[in-house]
Structures are given as structure tokens and as C-alpha cells.
Amino acid sequence: MADAAPVTDSAPVVVDRNDGRVIWLLLGAAFVAILNETTMGVALPHLIIDLGITEVAAQWLTTAFMLTMAVIIPTTGFLLQRLTTRAVFVAAMSLFSAGTLIAVLAPGFEVLLIARVVQASGTALMMPLLMTTLMTVVPARARGRMMGRVSLVIALAPAIGPTMAGLVLQTLSWRWIFGIVLPVALVALAVGARWIRNIGERTDARIDVLSIVLSVFGFGGLVFGLSEISGENGTTDAAAAALATTTFIVSLAVGVVALVLFVWRQFALQRRDDALLDMRVFRSGNFSLSVANFAVLSLAFFGTVTVLPLYMQNAVGLSALDTGLIVLPGALIMGLTGPPIGRIYDRWGTRVLLVPAALLTIALLWLFTSLTETTPVWELVAVYTSLLLGLAMSFTPLFTASLGSLPPHLYSHGSAVVTTVQQVAGAAGIAVMITILNAARTAAETTGATDAAAWAAGTRAAFVFAAIVAIPTLAGALLIRKPADSEGPAVGPH
């Protein structure tokens, strides 16, 4: 199916001044939340020493965050329709700020773990709120460039987070990772509580407790199982490996069964518009195909950003700070190209972006299958930066085309689906690629390979999986279209 005809209207797109302020405020709040989420990986070694905990316990500081996100995000479709925009924003930033404060003052591991859960509760509300608000207030013909700003936030925050954490930890305590973020979060909360008004229409749908329970076991079970197998695979302790495998199987089984029941329950509830997560979003083939492509690319993206630093530190022998600096240009490119990519989408549609992006992404993932322990740094920078450019050319049109394919009353549920898919696919990508890496690395070590060569062999095997999985995105790139603009020219003051 062809894209809508290219837009030729060169008149400036006008968004109400108050709506514009709300969007920028939500972008800033989302940036802070995602920035904080990506700092923990660098801080874990310091926390293990300072708090006197094991590596397994420390990993729970990230696992608990992912679990909380996976459990809460599916409920946001309901919450965004039931509560006012201001109420959701205040709740999100209050939870995030409270969790950050608890983390700064945490006397030990247990309190810090609680802080991470509270933080994640607020973060989970932020991205669906941002995307739903943007889709509601921005005219259809300008959504690409505005969604490009969302891509900027999603890319820049993970890029800056690890580098910022590395610099802070060189001179200050790990508490300052949270301490630096706290005043920014509090300012955003205060400003938002005053500026943000309600956007869209509220409903009086009743919350279904059974749906929440099934969502917890469904999405939580999937993410927990995947995080366990990726965290324990490759251990030399046979008992720990067996326990991890059992946990993975049981959690995955519980997650799948609960998820099937959850979907069945939503079909029953949506007949009277009481669904926690409305499945009618999948009646749009364009939405479904866009979400499927987004899931595959999220799997490859999160797997890559997890595997590549391990390769650079263990195979090439680079420091954590050097690794952060190497991946920084790619993430900056991914973020800064978001707005111009959005403008291309608004003007020309999806295929001009998605087709070359799919070809570029697939080719570069295959290039990563040739990495060795002697691969030069310049090559890593060039290939990784180009890969993230390809992903940037995909994410913005996929975000915009998927949600733009829905009627306005389903925007909040569509945003919840997209964000949930990102979390689950990201967890799956990390789990599968780390599992393949460790298995291939162990096999290489048994043949007498050096530690560096074994890590390189494991990395190559992981990227073979990512490259193969990415191939179907080319078919999606040919089929996904830009929804026809449904609104007339925007009106209102500059």
C-alpha cells in the first residue's frame, strides 16, 4: 500500500503555545527519567564494594527496575484515559523524585532496591504520557518532526547516562548519580504541576483487578524469566546454572499462560470499553506491522548496546570510560538526526526512510559478525555510529506511523502497547544475545582460545542471531505506510 501523497504545504505548523510548553516539559522529564535508568550499569561495580553485596544481588537493582516497568506500563492506557494529564504527570514525577531521594539517602542495599522500584513506577508512566499527549495536540502533518524529538530523548539519554556516571564515579560517591538528577526532577515536578493542563477526554471506566493481576504475572513473568537466564547463563556453578534454567522455564511458562488469559480478559472487557489495555489497536494492520518491526529492532538495539561494551572491555581491553566515549558519537547521531528524520517522514512518508534503514541495519549487523580481538577502534566507532543512524531512520517513522494509524480514543492504549513491546523485546534481546555470547565463549575456551579471542567469538555468534532476526524488517519496510493526514491545517497563536 502506498504512502500518502507528499506534503507540499510549506506553511509553518502551529501548535498552541500552552500545548508546546507541555510537550517540551514532558520531553525534559522523560529525558531525566531515562538518563537515570541508564546510569546504573556503570555504578554496579562500585555498589558491590560499597554496600558489600554479591553480583547477583546487585543485578537486582536493574532487574527490579525492568520488572516494575513491565508491570506498570500495560496499565497506562487505562490510567491516561481515567485520570487527568496533570494528575498522571504529578504522580509520575512525584514517584520518580521520591525514589531518587530515597536512593540518595539509602543506608543499604534493601532501601536502595526499594528506591529503584519507586523510581521505575514513575518512569513507566512518563513515555506513554508523552506519546499520547503529542499525538493528541500535534497536527497529523507535523507529527513526524515532533516524534523525532522523542527519538532524540530516547537516544541522547542512554548515550549521556553511562558517560556521566563514569565521570561522577571517578571523583564522587555513587550517591551523586542520583543527587545530580534530584534537583532537576523536583524543578520539573514544580513547573509541571503549575503549567500542565488536561489534554484529551477522560472516561469513567472501572479498573479491573483481575486484569492487573494477570498483567503482573504475564509481563512480569516474561521479563523476570528473561533477565534470569541472561544474568546466570555461563556460570561455572552447575547448581546455579540449573536453578537459572529452571527459573527461566517456570517464569516463561507462567508469563505466557498469564498473558494469554490477560488478552482473553481484555477482549471481554473492551465490549463495554472497560479494558485495561484495549486490543482493538491491533485491528489496524499498519499499527500491528509497525509494532512488529519496532519489536524486532528493539530486540537488536538493546542486545547490541549490551553486548558491544562487553566485547570492547573483555576482548579489545578498553576501559569503561573509553567504551562510553566510543559509543557516544553513535548515540548522539541517533538523537540529533531525530527531528530532520521526522521532517522527511512528514514530507515523504515511510518508505524513503524505512527501506534504506532496513538495508543499512541488516548489513551493519552482519559486519559485526566479523569482529575480532584486534578490530581497530576507528572501525568500531564507524560501524556502530552508522548502525544507530539506521535505527534512527526506523524508530521515528515507526513510532509515528503506528500511533497515527489509530483513532484518537485509542492513542493512550497504542502508546502503552508500543512502550510495553519495547520493554519486553529489549529484555528478550539482552537475554538471548548474552546467552548466545556466553555459550559460544565457553565453547571457544574449551578449544584453547585466549580469553580475548573467546569473547570475540561469543560476540560474533550473538550478532549472527541479531542479523538474522533483523532480515524480516525489510519486508515490513515495504509494507508500512504513512497514515493519511486526518486533520486540517493547525490554527492558533505562535
Image (tube, grey):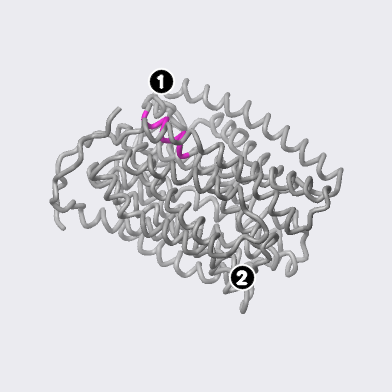
Residue depicted at x 44% and y 48%:
391
Numbered disc 1: secondary structure: helix
Rendering coords of residue 405 (x, y %): 32, 33
For the residues bearing labels 1 and 2, Cβ distance under 8 angstroms: no
Q: Quadrant of the C terminus?
A: bottom left
Numbered disc 2: secondary structure: helix
Range covered by the magenta-colored residues: 286-294
Rendering coords of residue 314 (x, y %): 70, 60
* Residue linked to disc 1: 271
Rendering coords of residue 298 (x, y %): 51, 44
The three-letter code of the residue at mark 2 reads Arg
Relative to 41, 234 lies left or right: right
The picture quadrant where one finds residue 112 is bottom right
Q: Is 261 in front, or is 381?
A: 381
Rendering coords of residue 444 (x, y %): 77, 48
Compared with 492, 404 (above or below) is above
Residue depicted at x 63% and y 70%:
174
The three-letter code of the residue at mark 1 reads Arg
Does the magenta portion include 288? yes
